[in-house]
Amino acid sequence: MLQAKHITFSYNKTTVLEDISFVVEKGEHLSIIGESGSGKSTLLKVIYGEYDLDNGQIFWKDQEVLGPKYNLVIGYDFMKYVAQEFDLMPFISVEENVGKFLSNFFPEEKKQRTAELLEVVELTSFAKTKVKILSGGQKQRVALARALAKQPEIILLDEPFSHIDNFKKQSLRRSIFKYLKDKNIACIVATHDKDDVLGFADKMIVLNDKKIHANNTPQYLYSNPEKPLIASFFGEFNIINNTIIYANQLQVVETSTLKATITQSYFKGNYYLVEGNLNGNKVFFEHHVDIDKGKTVFLKRID
Ligand code: ADP
Ligand code: MG
């Protein structure tokens, strides 16, 4: 189990994290979400032992994670970290990068392990390719495979799919997160993409203004978004009579007390996001077809 206990951290004099506490169980998947600049990357680096804390402690099981002041070599064998700016060796091949930290005394095992990992990140056909000529997304996948090579107990992933295009992203996410679950490897994933969280994370922490604003399951936080920041992570929403209502919770009905004039319809694939004016405020709802500008409709909350 990873335990973060009352962590406070500042860059020079600027405090970025204040009194942060949480736990990650063995094999658990924790997502850290928050706006850009909220401290997600900093939190991962601090957990990895890259910086010294102002206050607080971090433990993996009984072992305290210590910063550079107390540790000559940053990092531990049980923990791996894939930075937002991954750093690979450009002039050697994909498979050499992945196998870099595996022992040469077991060539057969090394070969098998490398092949297994390349399959997880869907790069088998690039095994012999030099990393230098890969795209950003392909490099990111090599970095993921390399971090997994020595089978850590916990892995820290910073925006792990940010450079990967939509064609590959869905299947890669499933493949990586399934692999981690199958091997019982805990993970902490910093992201601003709800698709990295929904369907995969056991727990989700919302970082805002240096603090943890919520720590719960994605299901709970989706159903009980106590703050607009939390609702905005999941999708388009409205605040009507002081209540947060997602766009997909409003339905057009024959008549109701919510009368809106349509201003715009946006095609979203299997639905339209319709924008209207409700008593001088913008309102958003989902509808199966588009609605003409200027038309009036009545809306009702459905659950
Ligand atoms: P996120 O990953 O959520 O976008 P970061 O952890 O990168 O947020 O940044 C949190 C805050 O710390 C930001 O205000 C950022 O400008 C600042 N920051 C990040 N890295 C450094 C650094 N090396 N030195 C000083 N300030 C930094
Ligand atoms: Mg970041």
Image (tube, grey):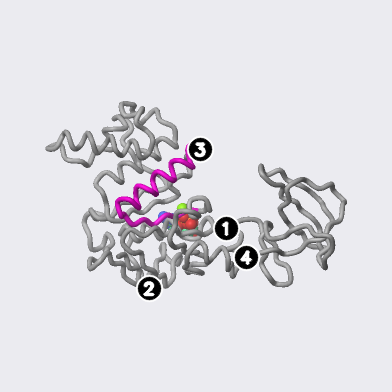
Earlier residue among tags 4 and 3? 3
| Amino acid type at image mark 4 | Pro
User: Are there few (<14), some (14-19), or many (20+) residues within 10 Å of tag 3?
Assistant: few
Q: Residue at x 50, y 64 (%)?
A: 206
Give the quarter of the image for residue 51. Answer: bottom left
The dot on residue 233 is 1
Expressed as whole percent of the image width and height from the top left, the position of residue 104 reads 15, 36
Q: Which residue is mark 2?
A: 6
Mark 1 vs ligand 1: CB below 8 Å: no
Most foreground residue, 60 or 201: 201
Spatial separation of the CA atoms under disc 1 and disc 2: 25 Å
- Looking at the rendered image, the disc whose residue lies closer to the viewer, 3 or 2, is 3
Question: Which secondary structure class fits the magenta region best?
Answer: helix
Spatial separation of the CA atoms under disc 4 and disc 2: 26 Å
Looking at this view, name the residue that lies furthest to the front.
254
Expressed as whole percent of the image width and height from the top left, the position of residue 161 reads 46, 44
Residue 70 located within the stretch drawn in magenta: no
Most foreground residue, 248 or 8: 248
Residue 190 located within the stretch drawn in magenta: yes
Spatial separation of the CA atoms under disc 4 and disc 3: 29 Å
Picture layout, residue 81 above or below residue 230: above
